[in-house]
Image (cartoon, rainbow, N blue to C red):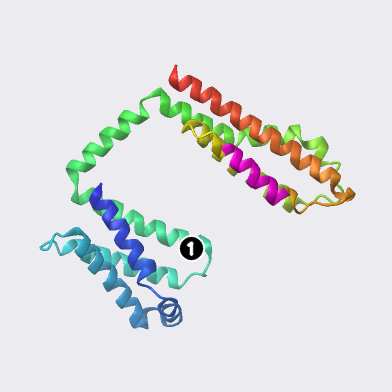
Amino acid sequence: MVLFFKWICAHLLGDFTFQSRKMVEHKRLYKARSGYLYLHVGIHAFLIYLFTGWWTCWPLPLAVGVSHFVIDLWKLYRKDTLFYFLIDQALHILVLVGLWWYFQPPLRDELMSRVRTIVETPSFWLVLSAYIFTIWPCALLLGYLTRRWRDMIPNHSSSMGEAGRWIGIFERLLVLTFILVGHYEGIGFLIAAKSILRFGEIKGADSRAETEYILIGTLMSFSASILTGLVCHYLLVN
């Protein structure tokens, strides 16, 4: 796995540290006619070659260079959005995974053996079920439980509800993780941080209904994730 992490480091250096904004803009403007595109690809191939240390293995940096060229050229004809950025990065990582899979058969077999061992344990499925419950069923239950207070808020917008839903999902995931790793103090920090960010902007009597709705939803969300974490932790240690 050390080799794969070296490749990830090489990719991050090539795609971000050694690629300036000027290079990106030039590539987007001239696409395949941009010299910076070929320089960027060459930097990636060289970094992979250098970090790997297999001085006679030319197919490896060649494969990285060609695949990087094809993926980057494809992205240059797409919109500059987060969606295509994530796809671009995912494709580069998949190429590295595929090359590691091909060039490291002993480690590949060892990794697959470890993965099978983990997946076949009850603890894996217990923790996975806890996270799935925290993300989806718990959000649905909290939505039903807080509906009557939500309907009392004047001029309630759907955007606020959507943002609140995602905030709730992330906070429950963090609380569950804190409990499973045994860092309960993180829950207190999370509550304090959310209180400052969410309640600091709510002032006046007109915001009383919204304040109470947020407070009830927050307490329910934290309680549900804490209870889920405690049950999961108890089952893991017994």
Please report the residue visible at 73 percent of the width from the left and 47 percent of the height from the top: 161
Q: Position of residue 141 (x, y in %)?
A: 68, 32
What amino acid type is highlighted by mark number 1? Tyr
* Left or right of 200 on screen, residue 119: left
Residue 58 drawn above or below residue 140: below
Quadrant hosting residue 191: top right
> Quarter of the image containing the C terminus?
top left
Q: Quadrant of residue 221?
A: top right
x, y percent for residue 197: 68, 51
Residue at image position (31%, 28%) is 117
Q: Would you say 216 lies left or right of 91 here?
A: right
Front in this rendered view, residue 78 or 140? 140
Q: Quadrant of residue 48?
A: bottom left
Q: Main secondary structure of the magenta part?
A: helix
Q: Is residue 170 left or right of residue 15?
A: right
Q: Write down the residue under mark 1.
A: 84
Front residue of this view, candidates 191 and 121: 191
Q: Is residue 190 magenta?
A: yes
Residue 70 percent coordinates (x, y): 34, 68
Residue 83 position, x and y percent, is: 51, 60
Q: Is residue 86 left or right of residue 166?
A: left
Magenta residues, as a range? 187-198
| Helix, strand or loop for disc 1 | helix
Question: At 15% from the left edge and 64% from the top edge, which residue is drawn?
Answer: 58
Image height check: is 67 above or below 189?
below
